[in-house]
Amino acid sequence: MAKAKEINELTKDELNVRLRDLKQEALNLRLQQVTGQLTNSARIRTVRRETARVMTALTAKALA
């Protein structure tokens, strides 16, 4: 899990790549949950929160 400070230090391109990766991971976790293969259900919450942090950082950089 990345801290907000670490996320804010990334460039816009790096944030976009990270966002894409997190969304893909969230999709994979949801699929695992539906098929009953998910072992760590807390990871869904962690990915969702990190996605929100990245989106917040992207918005802040766009407004700056």
Image (cartoon, helix red, strand yellow):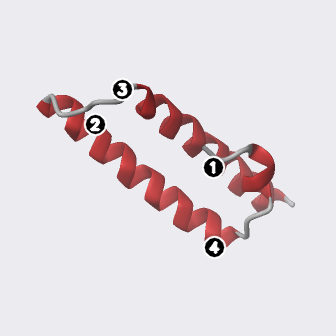
Quarter in which the C terminus is drawn: bottom right
Counting from the top left corner in percent of width and height, residue 35 is at 12, 33
Query: Which residue is labeled 2 in the image?
Result: 30
Which residue extends farthest left? 35
Q: Determine whether the residue tagged by mark 1 lies in a helix, strand or loop.
A: helix
Residue 27 is left or right of residue 21, and the answer is: left
Q: Is disc 4 surrounded by few (<14), some (14 to 19) or many (20+) residues within 10 Å?
A: few
Mark seen at residue 41? 3
Residue 1 is left or right of residue 62, and the answer is: left
Counting from the top left corner in percent of width and height, residue 55 is at 63, 49
Query: Which residue is labeled 4 in the image?
Result: 13
Q: Which sits earlier in the primary sequence, circle 4 or circle 3?
A: 4
Kindly report the distance in space between the C-alpha atoms of the residues bearing marks 1 and 2: 20 Å
State if disc 2 and disc 1 touch (CB < 8 Å): no
Residue 33 is left or right of residue 9, and the answer is: left
Mark seen at residue 42? none
- Mark 3, mark 1: which one is toward the viewer? 3
Q: Which sits earlier in the primary sequence, circle 1 or circle 4?
A: 4
Q: Which amino acid does label 1 sit on?
A: Met
Q: Which sits earlier in the primary sequence, circle 3 or circle 1?
A: 3
Q: In which quarter of the image is residue 26?
A: top left
Which residue extends farthest right? 64
Q: Which amino acid does label 3 sit on?
A: Ser
- Mark 2, mark 3: which one is toward the viewer? 3
Q: What residue type is labelled 4?
A: Asp
Kindly report the distance in space between the C-alpha atoms of the residues bearing marks 2 and 3: 10 Å
Q: Which sits earlier in the primary sequence, circle 1 or circle 2?
A: 2
For residue 39, above or below residue 10: above
Kindly report the distance in space between the C-alpha atoms of the residues bearing marks 4 and 3: 29 Å
- Mark 4, mark 3: which one is toward the viewer? 3
Query: Which residue is labeled 1 in the image?
Result: 55
Counting from the top left corner in percent of width and height, residue 49 is at 57, 35
